[in-house]
Image: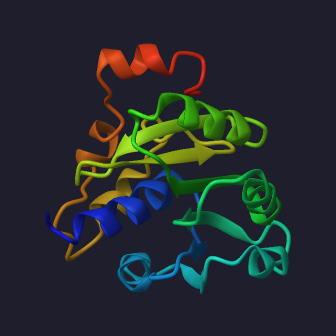
Amino acid sequence: MKEFIYPEMMIHVPVCTSKEANDILIISDNADLLSVEAARHSETNVKVITCSLSEISALEDNAYDVIVSEMASDPALFSQVNRVLRDDGQFVTTHPSLDEVEENKNIMKMLGNYFKVIMPYNLGNGSTALLSSKEYHPTADINLHRADMLDGLSYYNCDIHPAAFAMGNYIRKAYLGSIKN
């Protein structure tokens, strides 16, 4: 599989959903490719931390517009993400396969305590991520100017962005009431 697809989709979907994407936090043990993609947005400040809840706990309140996490999903993480994310912020996290319905419903229920919108999206490599937003809808509020002005991308574009949120009926039925859009 093309290794550029995953980092482009993990970064550009939430950043291009955000009205302002000045401050991005990446929570990962291996954030090199994610950091490269975030740096394509010249107006952003990127902070990378390793997968440590204590490091997240030390961060300033309301400091980030976008948070991208590859850390395991748990209530303590989501509480800290909510605290450091701005009032209109986007949060993207990896999660189990959509075939793991009950596990994902539990994750979505936890996220529902903090976010208005919770939607899985295709990463283009056979897996999905969860986008959670406090304010903006990822298909209705896409910043087309930001999405179209990115140079050097191999996969992501303004057409891929909304298409990534298309899900088959069996997924819609399985997650009815859990996906918040």
Q: Is residue 50 above or below residue 78?
A: below
Give me the residue at 43% from left, 13% from top: 173
Q: Quadrant of residue 56?
A: bottom right
Residue 68 shown left or right of residue 148 in the figure: right
Taking depth in this image into account, of 22 and 69 the one nearest to the observer is 69
Q: Is residue 170 above or below residue 126?
A: above
User: What's the coloring here?
Assistant: rainbow
Q: How many marks?
A: 0
Taking depth in this image into account, of 4 and 37 the one nearest to the observer is 4
* Image x and y of residue 88, in percent: 70, 51
Taking depth in this image into account, of 180 and 138 the one nearest to the observer is 180
| Visible residue check, residue 150 | yes
Quarter of the C terminus within the rendering: top right
Taking depth in this image into account, of 136 and 104 the one nearest to the observer is 104
Give me the residue at 23% from left, 51% from top: 124
Give me the residue at 69% from left, 33% from top: 109
* Image x and y of residue 106, in percent: 65, 34
Residue 118 shown left or right of residue 146 in the figure: right
Q: Quadrant of residue 51?
A: bottom right
Residue 144 shown left or right of residue 76 in the figure: left
| Visible residue check, residue 181 | no
Give me the residue at 53% from left, 56% from top: 93
* Image x and y of residue 24, in percent: 58, 73
Q: Is residue 62 above or below residue 158?
A: below
Quarter of the N terminus within the rendering: bottom left
* Image x and y of residue 62, in percent: 81, 66
